[in-house]
Amino acid sequence: MASDPAHSRFTLDRVLPGSPAHAFRFWSDPKLKNLWAGCHPDWTEREVRHDFRIGGHDFSRLADPMGVEHEVDIAYLDIAVPDRVVYSYAMRVDGKPLSASLVTLLFRPHNCGSLMRYDEHLLLLDGSDGAAAREIGTGHGFDRLEAVMAESLAAMS
């Protein structure tokens, strides 16, 4: 018998350098997204696809150093350039469903930069309470996003 899924929600706000349009590009342009979104440099890419449009999908299958495969399948539900992205995503480990999420991503002008608000409704299908780890991991990704964006603005100066 499968364990009961755990529901969770978290919101992360980040003030990013540059305009909302600049921040939006780091989600919509596959080359820019790849600069910050990969969280495990020691993992091997098996398959990666990007299709950033309403109805499009991003998909990645990576293998960790032990050979365990991790899949992320993103479906874009709504995109309003440069203000909003709404997407769902599912994660699997060695083909077994791990989680499903609905994410709303907003970009707003804020002082000399942009406020990015990330709101995730998370369903952990394996019965674990890994929501805190997901929030921490997402935050680490946004640390990388902020650094990469700052580097790109410095290079443009």
Image: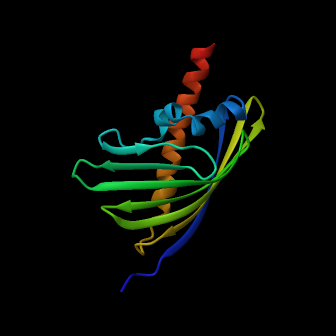
Q: Quadrant of residue 129?
A: bottom left
125 sits to left or right of 63: right
The image's colouring method is rainbow
Residue 118 drawn at (x, y percent): 63, 51
Residue 120 visible in the displayed image? yes
104 sits to left or right of 57: right
Residue at x 46% of width, y 51% of height: 137
From this view, report whether residue 69 is shown above or below residue 28. below
Which residue appears farthest toward the left when viewing the image?
66
Which one is nearer the viewer's eye here, 102 or 109? 102
Residue at x 48% of width, y 41% of height: 37
Residue 39 visible in the displayed image? no
Residue 86 drawn at (x, y percent): 65, 54
Of the 4 image quadrants, the one containing the C terminus is: top right
Residue 40 drawn at (x, y percent): 36, 43
Residue at x 29% of width, y 40% of height: 42
Of the 4 image quadrants, the one containing the N terminus is: bottom left
